[in-house]
Image: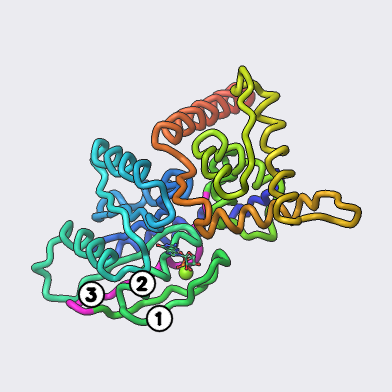
Amino acid sequence: MTIQWFPGHMQETEKFLKKAVSSVDTIMEILDARLPYSSANPLLDKICKNVFRLKILNKQDLADPDVTLSWLHHYRDIGENAIAVTGTSPVETWRAAEYALAGINRSKSRRIRVMVAGIPNTGKSTIMNSLAGKKIAKTGNTPAITRHQQRTSLKKQIDIYDTPGILWPILENKNGAYRLAVSGAISDTAIDYSDIAMFAIALMIKRYPERLKQRYGISIQEPENSQSADFEETEPLKILEEIGTTRGCLKKGGVIDYQKASELFIRELRAGKLGRISFETNQEAMEEQKALLEEWKSQVQYNDLTSTK
Ligand SMILES: Nc1nc2c(ncn2[C@@H]2O[C@H](COP(=O)(O)OP(=O)(O)O)[C@@H](O)[C@H]2O)c(=O)[nH]1
Ligand SMILES: [Mg+2]
């Protein structure tokens, strides 16, 4: 896959964030409800130890409600505070804000400081606007549109701050990087659409095959062994070709225009045209996290071994 990884001055961000976090009372961590694990940045786990933090699974209107519920149960089980919202709904975002405020001591006479933190495109600006009841922050499907930290005064003696600088997503987990790309959290100039479309189609075949049938009128071959590597390789490509054909994404001579078909499919998926879809379950995420930790551990051991030679 050709996603470019921007190192993003992690240490710089950590310094920045530490300072910002130390001056706020509570943190609203914005995640994408379709990929709560992959849209999280572990720096917040590290930095927010002494401050109340609420995980907000935003864009729940686009996510599979059953999967979102299972994520909320998961967070409850591991003792994390979490709520799901649609960022454009003031009723829902205020419910989340009240939850975040309930976690702190409000006897203070000074104004309460709330920080909205999260990787680009999770909906921080949308949520701030929704809480403020007016447009104070630019929103958009272009990641990283907010460049300077913004402070806004809300009712009830509350000031709300967005993330200073940019909290980059973590791309070490390959599946996570793909999901981020499908969701639009990675700048479209850095991604290869046909790669991303193939990943997304494979996900649809596995979890929501009937949606593909409904939207594009295509049939999915169920071979004797649909888990086979061969099937996983060839079936998404076949479906992409069918989408291209039915939607007229063709080049001269009737040849499929893969780029165009991929863009169309991703655009429709992002817009919710294929229904409410979650890109990862908590079981999957936990397995991937475990695998990643093992990999890091073995890298550290390898480095230790080689450096003592
Ligand atoms: N469907 C849906 N779209 C949302 C929601 N929240 C944000 N968005 C869209 O997601 C994109 C990124 O939102 P933005 O607030 O700019 O994200 P930021 O980069 O975290 O500030 C924009 O196109 C928003 O309109 C939501 O709850 N539901
Ligand atoms: Mg923003």
Camera sees residue 40: no
Please give the name of the residue rendered at 33% of the width and 79% of the height, measured from the top-left corner. Answer: 152
Distance from the alpha carbon under mark 2 to that under mark 1: 7 Å
Above or below: residue 68 compared with residue 31: above
Instruction: Determine whether the beta carbon of the residue marked 3 sits less than 8 angstroms from the nearest atom of ligand 1.
Output: no
Mark 2 Cα-neighbour bin, 10 Å: few <14, some 14–19, many ≥20:
many
Query: Which mark is drawn over residue 158?
Result: 3
Distance from the alpha carbon under mark 3 to that under mark 2: 12 Å
x%, y% of residue 255? 85, 49
Please give the name of the residue rendered at 38% of the width and 55% of the height, measured from the top-left corner. Answer: 60
The mark nearer the N terminus, 2 or 1, is 2
Q: Are discs 2 and 1 less than 8 Å apart at CB?
A: yes
Please give the name of the residue rendered at 65% of the width and 59% of the height, measured from the top-left corner. Answer: 188
Residue 55 shown left or right of residue 236 in the figure: left
- Magenta residues, start to end: 155-169
Main SS of the magenta segment?
loop
For badge 2, the amino acid type reads: Met
Camera-nearest residue between 3 and 61: 61
x%, y% of residue 243? 69, 48
Q: Secondary structure at mark 3?
A: strand
Residue that mark 2 sits on: 128
Camera sees residue 158: yes
Mark 1 Cα-neighbour bin, 10 Å: few <14, some 14–19, many ≥20:
some
Q: Secondary structure at mark 1?
A: loop
x%, y% of residue 129? 37, 75
Q: Secondary structure at mark 2?
A: helix
Residue that mark 1 sits on: 136
Instruction: Determine whether the beta carbon of the residue marked 2 sits less than 8 angstroms from the nearest atom of ligand 1.
Output: yes
The mark nearer the N terminus, 3 or 2, is 2
